[in-house]
Amino acid sequence: MNGLFRTVMTLGLAACLTGTAFVGDAAAQKEKGKKKAGMAAGQQIFTLPKEITLTDDQKTKLEEIKKEHGPKLAELTKKMDDTLTADQKKTRKEAVDKARADGKKGKDLQSAVDAAVALTDDQKKAQDEVKPELTKLQGSIREKLHGLLTTDQQEHYKLPKAKKNK
């Protein structure tokens, strides 16, 4: 179950379904959804909170990070997404939308999505083969993004806490 949770969590993050923490009013949420819909798979990781305004130099560095990691990120995200059927993709999207509308976030949101999207053993295995590399790449991208920001900007872009090894 823990592996399934991580798999669906990664899919949720990688399938352009992040960013609700930075949404203000309903109009802003609608506009943000339009922007993300046009993004390539997994590219929303390069989207920074609205509180962060980048300098021209930072924008150039951000583009370099995108060029360096974007293609591999898109490839891995596509591999994860390709493990799902069209019905499962639709179910996942509907489950995420409903959970968000219900005010769920984080683990609660993920649990709702997990319950809705039933993966076969073969799908779990296929995702488990891609997931470590995708997670490592996403962590590397987040660290690089964090590193290009000023100390003040970093206050608005926190890195996830490292998990303790058991």
Image (tube, rainbow, N blue to C red):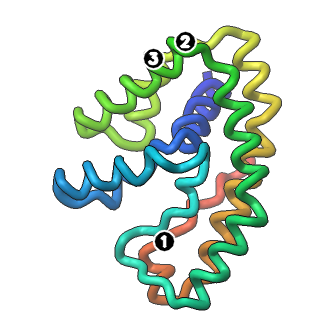
| In this view, 109 is above or below 34 | above
The type of residue carrying mark 2 is Ala
Relative to 51, say whether 134 is above or below: above
- Dot 2 falls on a residue whose secondary structure is loop
Q: Residue at x 78, y 50 (%)?
A: 72
What x and y, as percent, mark residue 19? 41, 54
Quarter of the N terminus within the rendering: top right
On the picture, is 128 further left or further right than 20?
right
Task: Give whichever of 41, 126 is nearer the camera.
Answer: 41
Say which residue label 2 marks.
Answer: 118
Q: Would residue 117 appear left or right of 100 to someone viewing this image?
A: right
CB atoms at circles 3 and 2 under 8 Å apart? no
What residue does disc 3 label?
115
The residue at which mark 1 appears reads as 157
Quarter assignment of residue 166: top right
Q: In this orientation, does residue 45 appear?
A: yes
